[in-house]
Image: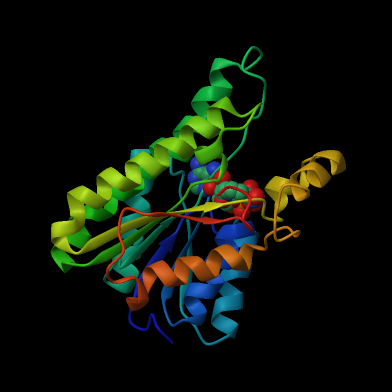
C-alpha cells in the first residue's frame, strides 16, 4: 500500500470515475472522503465498499460550485481524519449544445461546476496543505480540453481552463511541496458517456488507436500514481489517459 496514513478528498465520488478513484485510493491505504451532490445512498454504498475491504471512509454532501458548501466539506474531512493530503477534483457535468443554441445557463452551470468548482476546492485545501508542507492536487480535465469538440463549447472551455489552472496552481504552490497535476481522460465508460448515441460511441471508438473504450479504473490508477511517491518530481503536467486518441 502506497498511501497509508494519507487522507484523500474525492469530489463527485458516488459513481463513475470518482467512485473508482475513491476505491483505488482506499485500496492503497488512504482514508477517503466521498463527496457527493446527488444520491446519498450511492455515496454510502461506496463508503460501505471501502469499509468492507478494511478501509476508512465517510460520505459528505457538498456542491463544489458553492464556497460555503466546499468549506463545510473540507472542515468535515479535517475534523474526521485530521489532515487533507490528497484532493481529487473530479466532479463534473455536461450540458451539450451547439454554440448557436447554447443557453447562458448551460454555459454557467458547466463553468460553475467544472472550473469554478476546481478553483474553490483547491483554494479551500491550500492553507491546510501549506501548514502540512505537503499535498497532492489532481484535477480531472478531459482530452477535449486539449483538442476541442463540436457541441461542447462550455465543457471544453472549462476543461481547458482546468489545465491552465493546474499549471498556475502548480507554480504557486511548488515551494510548499504541493504538487498539482491533471489527467485528461479520453472516452471512459460511465453514466456520463452512456447517455451518448450508439452511432457517436462507434465514431469515438474508430479514433482510438488502442481500439477500446477506457474504464474508470484506468483513470483511478493514474490518480494513485500522481498521489504516490512515484510522482515526487512531477508537477504542472497533464497526462492523457485516452488509448492514444490525442497525441
Ligand atoms: P458522472 O456523471 O458519472 O459522475 C460525475 C459526478 O460528479 C457525479 O457523482 C455527480 O453527482 C458529481 N457532481 C456533479 N456536479 C457536482 C457538484 N456541483 N458538486 C459535487 N459533485 C457533483 O461522470 P464521470 O464520467 O464519472 O466523470 C467524472 C469526471 O471525469 C468529470 O469531471 C468528467 O468531466 C471527467 N471526464 C469524463 C470522461 C468520460 O468519458 N466519462 C472523459 C473525460 C473527462
Residue at x 26%, y 47% (from the top left corner): 169
Q: Position of residue 188 (x, y in %)?
A: 67, 55
Q: Position of residue 176 (x, y in %)?
A: 15, 61
Q: Is residue 4 left or right of residue 233?
A: right
Q: Which of the two residues, 223 or 148, is positioned nearer the viewer here?
A: 148
Q: Is residue 230 left or right of residue 18?
A: left
Let me know if residue 120 appears in the view: no
The quarter of the picture where residue 64 lies is: top left
Does residue 204 lie above or below 23 as drawn? Answer: above
Which residue lies most toward the top here? Answer: 100
Q: State which quarter of the image contains the N terminus.
A: bottom left
Q: Which of the two residues, 235 or 196, is positioned nearer the viewer here?
A: 235
Residue at x 50%, y 40% (from the top left corner): 146
Which residue lies most toward the right here? Answer: 198
Q: Which of the two residues, 63 or 174, is positioned nearer the viewer here?
A: 174
State the count of labels. 0
Residue at x 72%, y 57% (from the top left corner): 213
Q: Is residue 62 left or right of residue 202?
A: left
Amino acid at each position: 500500500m502506497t498511501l497509508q496514513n494519507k487522507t484523500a478528498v474525492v469530489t463527485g465520488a458516488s459513481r463513475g470515475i470518482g467512485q473508482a478513484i475513491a476505491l483505488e485510493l482506499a485500496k492503497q491505504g488512504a482514508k477517503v472522503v466521498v463527496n457527493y451532490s446527488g444520491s446519498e445512498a450511492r455515496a454510502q454504498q461506496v463508503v460501505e465498499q471501502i469499509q468492507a475491504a478494511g478501509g476508512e471512509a465517510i460520505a459528505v454532501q457538498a456542491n463544489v460550485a458553492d464556497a460555503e458548501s466546499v468549506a463545510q466539506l473540507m472542515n468535515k474531512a479535517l475534523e474526521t481524519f485530521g489532515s487533507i493530503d490528497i484532493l481529487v477534483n473530479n466532479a463534473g457535468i455536461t450540458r451539450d449544445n451547439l454554440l448557436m443554441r447554447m443557453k447562458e445557463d448551460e454555459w454557467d452551470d458547466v463553468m460553475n461546476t467544472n472550473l469554478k468548482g476546481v478553483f474553490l476546492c483547491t483554494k479551500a485545501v491550500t492553507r491546510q496543505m501549506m501548514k502540512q508542507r505537503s499535498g497532492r492536487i489532481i484535477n480531472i480535465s478531459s482530452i477535449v480540453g486539449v483538442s476541442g469538440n463540436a457541441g461542447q463549447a462550455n465543457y471544453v472551455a472549462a476543461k481547458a481552463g482546468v489545465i491552465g489552472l493546474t499549471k498556475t496552481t502548480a507554480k504557486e504552490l511548488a515551494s510548499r511541496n504541493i504538487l498539482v497535476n491533471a489527467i485528461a481522460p479520453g472516452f471512459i465508460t460511465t453514466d456520463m458517456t452512456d447517455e451518448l448515441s450508439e452511432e457517436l460511441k462507434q465514431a469515438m471508438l474508430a479514433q482510438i488507436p488502442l481500439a477500446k473504450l477506457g474504464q474508470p479504473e484506468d483513470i483511478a490508477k493514474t490518480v494513485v500514481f500522481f498521489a504516490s511517491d512515484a510522482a515526487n518530481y512531477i508537477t504542472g503536467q497533464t497526462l492523457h489517459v485516452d488509448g492514444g486518441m490525442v497525441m
